[in-house]
Structures are given as C-alpha cells and as structure tokens.
Image (tube, rainbow, N blue to C red):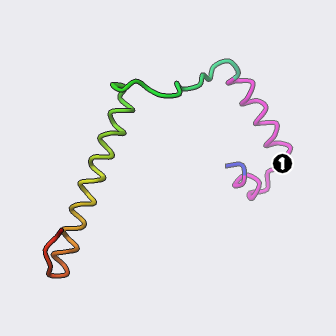
Amino acid sequence: MERRLIGEGLPIEEIQALCDVHGQVLDGHVVAAPASPDADHPATVFSREHEVVAELVAGIREIDQAVAEGRRAA
C-alpha cells in the first residue's frame, strides 16, 4: 500500500506520519498469536483437513492425467 501511495505522489513524510498514527492507535491492543495452537484448535483442524484435501486433489489429477494419456493410474 505504501508503494502505491508513493507511486500516486504522496510524500514519504506523510506516509511515515500515518504509520506513526497507526502505531499509536494499535499500541497495547495487538497481542501475539500463540506459537502453536492446540491439536483441537480450529486452525489446526483446518490445516490438517487442507493437507488431506490437497492429497486427494493430487491423486485425482494423477488419475485424470493417466486417463488423458490412455494409461492406467499407478
């Protein structure tokens, strides 16, 4: 966003001033996420589900490619 604003002609000093304002507004309100969510945390479950779906899609693509080439999938 900063690069876009600079490209549109906004002086760097004004961008830095806006960054300072954002920093002041957010100071003390932003907390770090836990290093590692619990095994049953929705983000962890979603990540595991994503891995399984990605494996299934890869398998389907392999079968599709084999069919397109007229051979049997491994």
Relative to 67, 8 lies left or right? right
Q: Where is residue 57 in the image (x, y as percent from the top left)?
A: 26, 57
What is the quadrant of residue 48 in the picture?
Answer: top left
Label 1 amino acid?
Ile
Residue at screen point 19% across, 78% down? 68
Quarter of the C terminus within the rendering: bottom left
Q: Position of residue 62 (x, y in %)?
A: 24, 67
Residue at screen point 52% across, 24% down? 34
Residue 9 falls inside the magenta stretch: yes
**Residue at the right extreme of this rendering:** 13
Residue at screen point 15% across, 75% down? 67
Q: Position of residue 47 (x, y in %)?
A: 36, 39
Element at label 1: helix
Between residues 61 and 27, which one lies in front from this camera angle?
61
> Vertically, is 6 above or below 16?
below
**Magenta span main SS:** helix
Relative to 34, 58 lies left or right? left
Residue at screen point 68% across, 18% down? 28
Between residues 74 and 68, which one lies in front from this camera angle?
74
> Vertically, is 45 above or below 68?
above
Q: Position of residue 43 (x, y in %)?
A: 39, 32
**Residue at the top extreme of this rendering:** 28
Relative to 33, 37 lies left or right? left
> Vertically, is 50 above or below 34?
below
What is the quadrant of residue 27 in the picture?
Answer: top right
Magenta range: 3-26
Relative to 73, 30 lies left or right? right
Between residues 8 and 73, which one lies in front from this camera angle?
73
Residue for badge 1: 12
> Vertically, is 4 above or below 52?
below
Q: Residues within 10 Å of mark 1 (few under 14, many from 20)?
A: few
Residue 16 falls inside the magenta stretch: yes
